[in-house]
Image: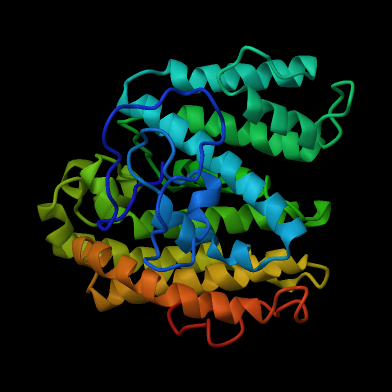
């Protein structure tokens, strides 16, 4: 459901056969230098999805490359799983072939029921990874919380990946956020059981920032996540928001100001709980520090572009490419092997607009 930026190169050519879960790392780094980056390790460009997700994955998860190898491998695995599901669902949308995703879902349901991955499944290697991670030698599940979160996420992708998705009001929008963002954030590793509710709230917040980041690209794909009742408060319709002219109106600017200045602070208050845990795993502390910097960049760029989504799309990704080396250097000093668990949201990552 994530649409690539204006700098992305849309996937072209023939559609690769869906035969393996983990496609080889054949794409060049989106960073434009010798640092390979995370995208080639998580399948950002695999399958014929709506667009190439390489630079988005650097924006979201470049910090993972600063983890020690054993911890990094687990994070990369989970991110790769989520990216695979996302891209297969998008491929199904592009080809108007619901069987692409439903086949994956059927294989997962068989794994839950029987404890084995189907040997003739097109995503057998992927399902086998899930089995090894969450099921015992004889097929009995031993990580019920992760299985439940993954099941919630897959069901949500199946429910919400549709070309004419319409969300009516804020409660429905927040149900969507909880199912998508909350679901896959709880699949990430090293979160303690007592932290899962807070992790889900952070995942919902992260999803909203992704929507703001992708406004122009979503418009081009006919996707609008703003609830229709909220649009109406600003004299807007879904059709208007899905047109370039609609993005230039005073009502659209007021909508984005409301989102940044009134709605997001409410979500941040709920999400802030996770920053207060003294026993937060170091990798999670790094993740939050990175994310807060990303949220600040999204808010700052929107304001700098005077809430012009098209201009934002052109400016934001240039800033990502410029910021990534510096941000990774900042995060590196807090990696578990070189320093203490980082306190979350320290300067220079706070901002006046995005305060935690």
Quarter holding the C terminus is bottom right
Q: With 268 as the anchor, is 134 left or right in this view?
A: right
Q: Nearer the viewer, residue 88 or 209?
A: 88
Residue 16 x %, y %: 39, 27
Residue 251 x %, y %: 19, 61
Residue 160 visible somewhere in the drawing: no
Reply above or below: 102 against 135: above
Task: Determine the residue positioned at 77% across, 55% down.
Answer: 190
Residue 352 occupies quadrant: bottom left
- In the rendered image, the residue lying farthest to the left is 245
- In the rendered image, the residue lying farthest to the bottom is 347
Residue 134 visible somewhere in the drawing: yes
Q: With 190 as the anchor, is 326 left or right in this view?
A: left
Residue 318 x %, y %: 31, 70
Q: Nearer the viewer, residue 193 or 255?
A: 193
Task: Determine the residue positioned at 37% across, 39% down.
Answer: 168
Residue 222 occupies quadrant: top left
Q: Tally the marks.
A: 0
Task: Determine the residue positioned at 58% across, 54% down.
Answer: 203
Task: Determine the residue positioned at 40% across, 46% down.
Answer: 2
Reply above or below: 307 against 245: below
Residue 330 x %, y %: 58, 81
Quarter holding the N terminus is top left
Reply above or below: 266 against 3: below
Q: With 234 as the anchor, is 149 left or right in this view?
A: right
């Amino acid at each position: 459901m994530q649409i690539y930026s204006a700098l992305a190169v849309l996937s072209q050519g023939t559609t690769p056969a869906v035969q393996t879960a983990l496609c080889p790392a054949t794409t060049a780094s989106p960073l434009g230098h010798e640092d390979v980056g995370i995208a080639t390790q998580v399948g950002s460009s695999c399958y014929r999805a709506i667009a190439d997700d390489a630079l988005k994955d650097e924006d979201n998860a470049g910090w993972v490359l600063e983890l020690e190898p054993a911890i990094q491998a687990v994070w990369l695995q989970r991110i790769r799983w989520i990216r695979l599901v996302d891209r297969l669902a998008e491929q199904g949308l592009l080809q108007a072939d619901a069987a692409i995703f439903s086949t994956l879902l059927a294989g997962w349901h068989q794994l839950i029921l029987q404890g084995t991955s189907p040997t003739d499944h097109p995503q057998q290697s992927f399902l086998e990874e899930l089995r090894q991670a969450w099921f015992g030698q004889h097929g009995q599940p031993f990580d019920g919380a992760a299985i439940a979160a993954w099941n919630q996420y897959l069901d949500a992708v199946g429910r919400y990946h549709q070309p004419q998705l319409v969300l009516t009001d804020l409660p429905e929008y927040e149900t969507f956020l909880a199912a998508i963002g909350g679901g896959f954030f709880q699949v990430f590793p090293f979160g303690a059981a007592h932290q899962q509710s807070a992790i889900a709230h952070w995942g919902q917040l992260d999803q909203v920032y992704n929507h703001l980041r992708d406004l122009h690209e979503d418009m081009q794909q006919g996707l609008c996540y703003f609830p229709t009742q909220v649009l109406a408060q600003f004299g807007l319709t879904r059709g208007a928001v899905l047109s370039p002219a609609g993005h230039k109106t005073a009502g659209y600017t007021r909508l984005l100001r409301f989102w940044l200045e009134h709605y997001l602070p409410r979500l941040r208050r709920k999400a802030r709980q996770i920053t207060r845990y003294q026993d937060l795993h170091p990798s999670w502390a790094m993740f939050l520090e990175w994310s807060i910097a990303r949220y600040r960049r999204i808010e700052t760029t929107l304001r700098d572009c005077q809430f012009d989504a098209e201009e934002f799309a052109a400016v934001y990704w240039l800033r990502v490419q410029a910021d990534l080396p510096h941000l990774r250097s900042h995060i590196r000093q807090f990696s578990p092997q070189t320093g203490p668990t980082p306190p979350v949201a320290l300067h220079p990552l706070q901002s006046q607009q995005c305060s935690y």
